[in-house]
Image (cartoon, rainbow, N blue to C red):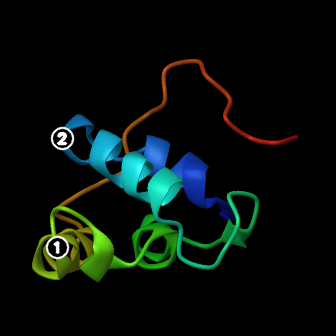
Amino acid sequence: MKDTILNYLYKLPDKYRSKAISNHTNKPKYLSNYAFIKSMADAINYAFDWNCTPEGFEYWADIYAAIQQGRIKEQEVQSENYSIY
């Protein structure tokens, strides 16, 4: 299913969500919040430049790998619709 970067970031587990959203808001990479992508791993990859975050490249590379390996899964968003439509 395709969704926006921001919607995927809202589906991250609590301990990663606020950091990812903050980095995306303050240091966006090159895709807009409204660009549709295919997966949560793509959202982390395209949301911000990992090198320019307080957590650093290795932190986000580990998160990205964990998502791809299925060790981090999407969380249900509580009755909120963050879609632009």
Residue 44 image offset from top left, x and y in percent: 40, 69
- Where's residue 49, x and y in %? 39, 78
Direction from residue 40 to residue 28 in the image, left or right: right
Please tell me which residue is depicted at 18% across the width and 40% down the height of the picture: 15
Judge left or right: residue 59 versus residue 7. left
Indicate the position of residue 85 as horizontal and vertical percent values: 88, 40
Up-down relation of residue 65 to residue 79 (above or below): below
- In screen coordinates, is 63 left or right of 29? left
Q: Give me the residue at 49% from left, 20% from top.
A: 78
N-terminal-most mark, 2 or 1: 2
Residue at the extreme right of the image, as rendered = 85
Q: Secondary structure at mark 2?
A: helix
Q: Would you place residue 67 above or below residue 10 in this image?
A: below
| Residue marked by disc 2 | 15
Task: Quarter of the image for the N terminus: give it.
Answer: bottom right
Say what amino acid the circle numbered 2 marks.
Answer: Lys
The residue at 60%/73% (across/down) is 38
Asked if 84 appears above or below 48 in the picture, the reply is above
Q: Is residue 41 visible?
A: yes
Q: Quickly name the residue at label 1.
A: 56
